[in-house]
Image (cartoon, helix red, strand yellow):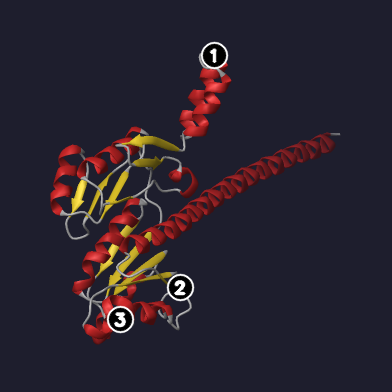
Amino acid sequence: MDSGELNRLFDAVWKRELKPDEALARIKTAPYDHDIEGVAKVDLHRHVRCGFPEVVFGPGKTDEQIVAILRTLLDHGQGGLVTRIEAKTGERLEREFHGGFYHSAARTFRVPSPVDPGPKMGRVVIVTAGTSDLPVAHEARVTAEAWNCDTSLIADVGVAGLHRLLNRLGELEGADAIVVVAGMEGALPSVVGGQVSCPVIAVPTSVGYGASLGGLAALLGMLNSCSSNVVTVNIDGGFNGGYVAGLIARRAGAARNAGTASSHAHATENAIAADGSKAATSSVGETSGAGSRKHTSK
C-alpha cells in the first residue's frame, strides 16, 4: 500500500463509503497479498521500507507461480525482477508481460513498473576480472539498472594483465559504487579499491580450477582485502552486489540532487537580495539628490 492507496482509503472513510474498522483491517493486511497460488505472500510494502520491490528468486518456482507473483506486483504499481531462470521460463515471461526483457547471460527477467520512476540517479560501474565472470556481472548490472541507476561495464581487466585496468581507470571516476566480479584468487577488488574513493562491492565467482573450491578461495581473498573500501557478498552473488551498489548510488545521487537544488535556491535568494539592495540604494540616492537640489534652490 503506497501513499496514493492510503489517500484513497482515508477519502473513502471521510465520505462514509467505508467504515473505520474496515479501513483498519485493510491497512493491517495490506503489507502482503494472501494466497498467490496458495504458496506465496508477496511483500507489497518492501519498496516502502527498503526502496526496492520484492525480487523473485526463480529456482524452485513454476512458471505459473512466477507469473502470478509478477502480476501481483504490477497490479500494485511495482516493477518486477526475477533471477536465475532458464531461457524457456524467460521466453514465457516475455510473452506474458509486454515491455519485459529476458537477459539470457544474466538469467534474469525484468518488467518495469507502470509508474514513471523519474530521472536516473547515481552511477554504478561493474568490473570483471575475466570473460568467464560476465554472467554474474550482467546479473549485477540488471539489478543496478532496476534501481534506476546509470550503469556501465568494464570486462576482462584482471590482474594477470594489470595494464588493461590501468588504461580504463578514467571510467571509474565519478562512480558512486563499483561492483568488482572475479574468480580464481579474487585479487582484483583490492586493486580497484586502492584506486578509487567510493565503495567497492566484491563479488567472488565460482570460476577457477580445483583449489579455487568453487569460489571459496576468491571469497576468502576478498574478505581479507587490505583495501579498506572493499566489502564482499556471497559467491556468484551478482544480484547482491548490484543491489547494494544500486542502494548506495541512489542515495548518493539523491543527495547530489538535493544539494544542487539547495544551491540554486540560495543563488536565487542572493540574487533577489542583491536586486533589492540595489533598488534601495538607488532610491536613497535619488532622495538624497532631490534634497540637495532643494537646498541649493533656497
Label 2, label 3: how far apart the Cα atoms are: 16 Å
Please determine whether, in this image, residue 294 is positioned above or below residue 53: above
Q: Is residue 114 visible?
A: no
Q: What is the secondary structure assignment of the residue under circle 3?
A: helix
Q: Nearer the viewer, residue 245 or 27?
A: 27
Q: Is residue 226 visible?
A: yes
Residue depicted at x 50% and y 24%: 9
Please determine whether, in this image, residue 126 is positioned above or below residue 291: below
Closer to us: mark 1 or mark 2?
1
Give percent across and percent down for residue 118: 38, 43
Left or right for 260, reference 83: right
Residue depicted at x 73% and y 42%: 285
Q: Earlier in the sequence, mark 2 or mark 3?
A: 3
Give percent across and percent down for residue 27: 51, 31
Label 1, label 2: how far apart the Cα atoms are: 55 Å
Give the residue at mark 1.
Answer: 15
Give the residue at mark 2.
Answer: 197
Q: Nearer the viewer, residue 168 or 32?
A: 32
Quadrant of residue 178 within the rendered picture: bottom left
Q: Amino acid at mark 3?
A: Leu
Q: Check disc 2: other Cα within 10 Å, few if <14, some if 14-19, many if 20+.
A: some
Give the residue at mark 3.
Answer: 166
Give percent across and percent down for residue 81: 30, 48
Q: Earlier in the sequence, mark 1 or mark 3?
A: 1
Q: Quadrant of the C terminus?
A: top right
Closer to us: mark 1 or mark 3?
1
Quadrant of residue 245 within the rendered picture: bottom left
